[in-house]
Amino acid sequence: MSPGAAGVAKSSFRDSNTPAPRPLRCRVVRPLPIERPGKIVCVGINYRDHAEEQGIEPPSAPVLFAKWPNGLIGPGDPIVIPPITKQVDYEAELAVVIGERIRGGSHENAREAVRGFLCLNDISARDLQFSDGQWTRAKSLDTFCPVGPRLVPRTEVPDPQVLAIRCLLNGEVMQDSTTANMVFTVAEIVAYASETMTLEPGDLIATGTPAGVGIFREPPVLLSDGDEVTVEIERLGALTNPVSAES
């Protein structure tokens, strides 16, 4: 070893008076009820009652945005609120899992491309969402995409447009609607998305949330440490997650 190399090697050792680096935080991650998707496509303002509670008109075409896969957690996993946000909200949603590759599909092809359905909670950092003017960062924080309880095959859901959908916070019903209130149906959303992107098997689509989200209540009702939030959808079951503040 050259003298220079020895000096470098010696200097790489931590001095005894230097504080030890903080250990990395880790959490136990349970297996997801679905394969990890290549992309998560979300639809904004897709329930008539949700548009009404905001005092706006429903959109003339699906409003698409992205939610990144790092947010995925399963049933029972904690939704962790980091210090960067003070306004964390729930959104009960019907999620669609793609089963066949589709690009530029018709409504009929879109229905055939669906593998199945499950519950999704589109957790949203409202302060980030409103300050950014777009939605991706506010909806892609770690743990902000609970899904479950299981993937229900398309054959077990004859009509995804007639399903009751609810969200409960600490046992109290906050959202209570039906997928019949969607502005755009599942088939219309899949076909529309496939016009501009190839949807691959395993891709996940969140189809929007009904009225009753916390931020538009008077006063607002937002998630906090110790809460428990549940998304219930007819035929699909219930997805429940605790909420904790990052320490």
Image (cartoon, rainbow, N blue to C red):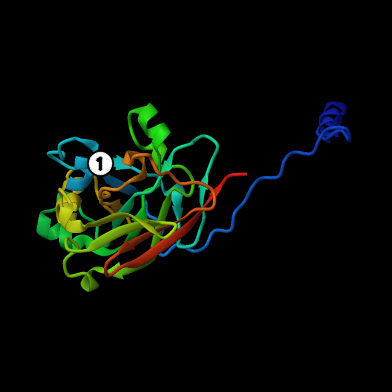
Instruction: Work out whether residue 152 or residue 211 is closer to the camera in this orientation and state it.
Output: 211
Instruction: Work out whether residue 31 or residue 56 is closer to the camera in this orientation and state it.
Output: 56
* SS type, badge 1: strand
Q: In this view, does 32 lie to the left or right of 102?
A: right
Instruction: Work out whether residue 117 or residue 237 is closer to the camera in this orientation and state it.
Output: 237
Q: What percent of the width, then of the height, locates residue 205? A: 29, 52
Q: What percent of the width, then of the height, locates residue 11? A: 83, 30
Q: What percent of the width, then of the height, locates residue 239? A: 40, 62
Q: What percent of the width, then of the height, locates residue 117? A: 28, 63
Q: Mark 1 points at which residue?
A: 64
* Quadrant into which the N terminus falls: top right
Kind of residue indicated by mark 1: Leu
**Residue plotted at (50% across, 58% down):** 77
Residue closest to the far front: 218
Q: Is residue 188 left or right of residue 141?
A: left
* Residue count near mark 1 (Cα–Cα under 10 Å), binned few <14, some 14–19, many ≥20: some
**Residue plotted at (54% across, 40% down):** 82
- Any part of residue 97 in sight: no
Looking at the image, residue 156 lies above or below residue 186: below
- Any part of residue 80 in sight: yes
Instruction: Work out whether residue 81 or residue 173 is closer to the camera in this orientation and state it.
Output: 173
**Residue plotted at (36% across, 44% down):** 214
**Picture quarter containing residue 118?**
bottom left
* Quadrant into which the C terminus falls: top right
**Residue plotted at (41% across, 60% down):** 171
Q: In this view, does 87 lie to the left or right of 185?
A: right
Q: Is residue 156 left or right of residue 66?
A: left
**Picture quarter containing residue 110?**
bottom left
Looking at the image, residue 89 lies above or below residue 74: above
Looking at the image, residue 189 lies above or below residue 12: below
**Picture quarter containing residue 178?**
bottom left
